[in-house]
């Protein structure tokens, strides 16, 4: 069965430090992966998806099919990056594609 | 565009009461879905719809009903509220099922 694992509930770093939020997936099909972010008092919103291969707010994520991972990285964390981050996998089911989310990682960036 | 709207923002129910959480979108999106967000559990899909008149169950559908009579609206009904349904509920929409999802602001529900 498909599954998304975010092993860290909480990640705490200092401003300027590198950040890596881990995401591992389990899926027999061709994966489509997303990172969503929820800032305090704001809606969940898309941060990036693997097929676009772009950098958003300094974050990048590379799909590694061999390690079944889609880790989110940023070389220098900023205080405004503090938020809840969710990794999501789209899987095929009954003619539709359905997202399944990880449990989320709370990132806190200290000044 | 208002995007995805949800009402109410907050609701307190007693066990056994029923209610409907409203969700509407003005982006002409075909795909709509309902999630619940619980601490340590992430987002779990309750029900989804790929178009008007079509709905299907997600991961945690028990105790909830949905209908999709129009493209714009996707209400979620709690038939007989239970304390286990205390959660934050998010509605989302997407142009189609393989695209980015746009989320509403959420409804915080407490069942006593």
Image (cartoon, coloured by chain):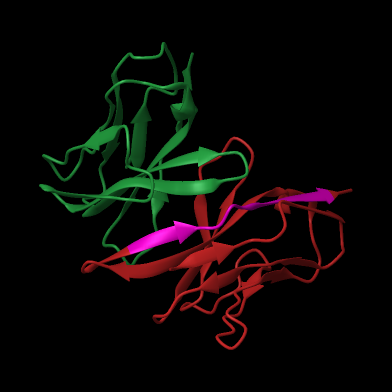
Above-or-below relation of B12 to A80: above
Q: Residue at x 60, y 67 (%)?
A: A56
Q: Which chain is green?
A: B
Residue A99 forms part of the magenta stretch: yes
Above-or-below relation of B25 to B30: above
Above-or-below relation of B7 to B74: above
Q: Residue at x 44, y 28 (%)?
A: B85
Q: Identify the image quadrant of residue B76.
A: top left
- Give, as a single range, the part of the protein colored magenta: A98-109
Q: Residue at x 16, y 45 (%)?
A: B71
Circle count: 0
Side (left or right) of A17 relative to A101? right
Side (left or right) of A5 relative to B80? right
Q: Whole-percent x and y of residue A41?
A: 59, 35
From the image, state the color of chain A: red
Q: Nearer the viewer, residue A32 or A48?
A: A32
Q: Whole-percent x and y of residue A100?
A: 44, 59
Residue A56 forms part of the magenta stretch: no
Q: Nearer the viewer, residue A106 or A91?
A: A91
Q: Nearer the viewer, residue B108 or A54?
A: B108
């Amino acid at each position: 069965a498909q599954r998304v694992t975010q092993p860290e509930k909480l990640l705490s770093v200092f401003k300027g430090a590198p950040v890596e939020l881990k995401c591992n997936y389990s899926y027999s099909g061709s994966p489509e992966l997303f990172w969503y972010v929820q800032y305090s008092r704001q809606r969940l919103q898309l941060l990036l998806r693997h097929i676009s291969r772009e950098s958003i707010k300094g974050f990048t994520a590379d799909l590694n099919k061999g390690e079944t991972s889609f880790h989110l990285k940023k070389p220098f964390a900023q205080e405004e990056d503090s938020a809840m981050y969710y990794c999501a996998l789209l899987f095929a089911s009954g003619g539709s594609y359905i997202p399944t989310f990880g449990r989320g990682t709370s990132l806190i960036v200290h000044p | 565009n208002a995007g995805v709207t949800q009402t109410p923002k907050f609701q307190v129910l007693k066990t056994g009461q029923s209610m409907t959480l409203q969700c509407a979108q003005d982006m002409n999106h075909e795909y709509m879905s309902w999630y619940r967000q619980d601490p340590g559990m992430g987002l779990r899909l309750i029900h989804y719809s790929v178009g008007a008149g079509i709905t299907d169950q997600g991961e945690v559908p028990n105790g909830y009903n949905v209908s999709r009579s129009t493209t714009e609206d996707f209400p979620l009904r709690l038939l007989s509220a239970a304390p286990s349904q205390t959660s934050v509920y998010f509605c989302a929409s997407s142009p189609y099922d393989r695209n980015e999802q746009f989320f509403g602001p959420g409804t915080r529900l407490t069942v006593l």
